[in-house]
Image (cartoon, rainbow, N blue to C red):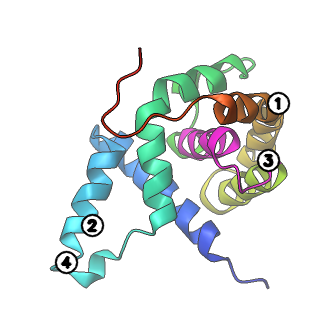
Amino acid sequence: MKQPGTRHKARRRAVDLLFEAEAKKVSPAQLVAERREYVRTDESVGTIHDYTAKVIEGLAGDQDQIDAVIASHLREWTLERLPAVDRAIMRLATWELFNSFDVDPIVVVDEAVELAKELSTDDSPAFVNGVLAKIAELAPQVRAAAAAEPRQAPGESAE
């Protein structure tokens, strides 16, 4: 059996943190910051991989838009009715589809399906695959638009 790679482990940790943050009704970015502080005194907490932090921080800024995209691709479901772990997986994957330029969209969807197999219900992998496959069709346009936007220097304001 193939061993999971570092990115897979980072994604899994991100899903765990997203799930926990939702259950506790706290910001996922706040949870990452707390964990990074805890690990300094208690190594049993485990370090937060840089990719996990990047995804969580990215989601923190884009969650409303990410949720709107996911909700618009659900049929006969609402985002709130989905199992919390499925929401976390789809939020992570949708953010990656739109923002991780170094990861092929097919890989993002495959990873999300694997996470659903590991963490969710028997029906979840197929459901997650169906929703994300539709969202993945948007990824090239979203990525191209993001790449075309001028980057601001720190401290600059948009005018």
- Above or below residue 80? Residue 139 is below
Residue 119, percent from left and from top: 60, 58
| Cα–Cα gap, marks 1 and 4 | 42 Å
Q: Which residue position is annotated with label 4?
A: 40
Q: Amino acid at mark 4?
A: Arg
Mark 1 or 3, nearer chain start: 3
Which residue is pictured at 35% across the width and 24% down the height? Answer: 157
Mark 2 or 1, nearer chain start: 2
Which residue occupies the foreground of this view, 16 or 123?
16
Q: Which residue position is annotated with label 1?
A: 134
| Cα–Cα gap, marks 2 and 3 | 29 Å
Q: Which residue position is annotated with label 3?
A: 105
Of the 4 image quadrants, the one containing the N terminus is bottom right
| Cα–Cα gap, marks 4 and 3 | 35 Å
Residue 36, numbered label = 2
Q: Amino acid at mark 2?
A: Arg
Q: Is residue 81 visible?
A: no
Residue 94, percent from left and from top: 65, 38
Cβ atoms at labels 2 and 4 below 8 Å apart:
yes
Which residue is pictured at 51% across the width and 62% down the height? Answer: 51
Mark 2 or 3, nearer chain start: 2
Q: Is residue 62 visible?
A: yes
Q: Secondary structure at mark 2?
A: helix
Q: Which residues are magenta?
A: 87-105
Compared across the picture, whether 157 is left or right of 138 comes to left
Which residue occupies the foreground of this view, 120 or 152?
152
